[in-house]
Image (cartoon, rainbow, N blue to C red):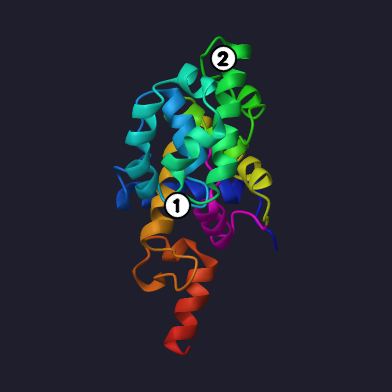
Amino acid sequence: MAETLGALKARIAGIGKRLASAYPDAGCALVFMDPWECLVSTILSAQSTDRKVNEAAPALFGRFPGVKAFAKAEPSDVEPFIKVLGLYRAKAKNIVGSARAILSAHGGVVPDTIDELVKLPGVGRKTANCVVLNAYGKPGIMCDTHFCRITKRLGLHDLDDPDKIEFAVARLLPPERWGDFSHRVIVHGRECCHSRRPECPRCPLLQECPCGRAESTWLAGV
């Protein structure tokens, strides 16, 4: 029988407590100085690692200091600075396009709402949530690959679409807890619940995870 909404809310509360104990200091790994740098770094992080983005960002922001500088640039000007990252041509085009849109439609100020952010070139809900959460301190759920994989393994939903997963998990938690929960799930995905060969025996969420319990039972030969 599928769990009731009340049961899911109670279970995710327990998961949140375990995550808080395991990763009390979890937060955004991207380094940025303002909302614009947060937006650019988040765009760059697609199919790349935060570490690589942080390594490339100082030279990029040194050459193009702020929205106006990016708006005046051409994508081909930006590309050499981010060539070490995946999809660099598309990212350069989207960053320049976003800078121009922000300058013309928002007076150079990065929007602080998801509805406005997703109107920018190449910005989906995951990126928009990252900006409103990490740059503006507003509630947000970051449905990256780790978050989608782990919340499904935990049985919190049976979905594959990140936008649908965002809304499914959002209804289980109060908005003020969305951000911490997202950050901790993502860190858990990097450190323990890997896409391949998750480290179930040492997982702090093992008792809450149907997939983990099944895996541990199989390994034990029960």
Q: Judge whether 167 appears above or below 32 on screen.
A: below
Q: Which mark is residue 103?
A: 2
Q: Is residue 40 visible in the rendered structure shown here? A: yes
Q: Which comes sooner in the sequence, label 1 or label 2?
A: 1
Instruction: Give SS at disc 1.
Output: helix
Where the N terminus falls, by quadrant? Answer: bottom right
Q: Residue, x 52% and y 76% (percent of image)?
A: 214
- Mark 1–mark 2 distance (CA, rounded to whole Å): 42 Å
State the image quarter where residue 124 is shown. top right
- Give coordinates of residue 33: x percent, y percent: 34, 25
Front residue of 48/204: it is: 48
Q: Does 144 lie within the magenta span?
A: yes
- Give coordinates of residue 129: x percent, y percent: 54, 34
Q: Does 53 lie within the magenta span?
A: no
- Residue where numbered disc 1 is placed: 15
Instruction: Give SS at disc 2.
Output: helix
Extent of the magenta region: 141-158
Q: Judge whether 219 appears above or below 55 on screen.
A: below
Q: Residue pushed farthest bottom? A: 221
Task: State yes or no: discs 1 and 2 in contact (Cβ < 8 Å).
Answer: no
Q: Residue, x 68% and y 51% (percent of image)?
A: 161
Mark 2 neighbour class, 10 Å CA radius: few under 14, some 14 to 19, many 20 or more: some
- Give coordinates of residue 180: x percent, y percent: 41, 39
Q: Residue, x 56% and y 19% (percent of image)?
A: 111
State the image quarter where residue 191 is shown. bottom left
The type of residue carrying mark 1 is Ile
The type of residue carrying mark 2 is Leu
Q: Judge whether 10 appears above or below 134 on screen.
A: below
